[in-house]
Image (spheres, helix red, strand yellow):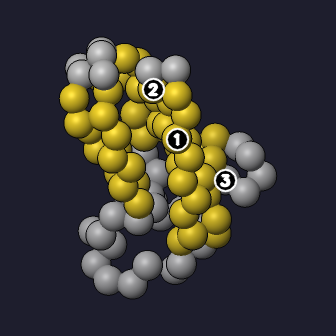
Amino acid sequence: MPGSGTAHVATLRFALPRASLVVAHVIDSAGQTVHTLCEAELEPGEHVCSWDGRDGAGRPFPAGTYTLRLEAAHRVLCARVVTLR
């Protein structure tokens, strides 16, 4: 993704009807979890989970296709993300 590296690669917006454990992972094309975005008990309401294409240490992941997988309130939301370097 060109630019300063501060733009979000992907943003998942979701609403919780009640307090729930939310777990969001970045999964690579081999099906391996390569980064955890969120693992927390969140209150009811609107929430946002974003990924900027970097790992927990701030290093960019290689170009490729990744899946963002969010589990909350007995539901699963997935979004495919393609990163370019």
Which of these two is toward me, 85 or 43?
43
What's the amino acid at mark 3?
Asp
When asked about the image quadrant of residue 81, the answer is: bottom right
What's the amino acid at mark 2?
Ala
Mark 1 residue element: strand
Note whether residue 9 is visible.
yes
Question: What residue is disc 2 on?
Answer: 72
What's the amino acid at mark 1?
Leu
Query: In the visual, does 57 lie left or right of 27?
Result: left
Question: What residue is disc 3 on?
Answer: 28
Q: Residue at x 72, y 57 (%)?
A: 29
Q: Residue at x 33, y 64 (%)?
A: 8
Query: In the visual, does 53 lie left or right of 19?
Result: right
User: Earlier along the polypeptide chain: callout 2 or callout 3?
Assistant: 3
Question: What residue is disc 1 on?
Answer: 77
Note whether residue 39 is visible.
no
Mark 1–mark 2 CB contact (< 8 Å): yes
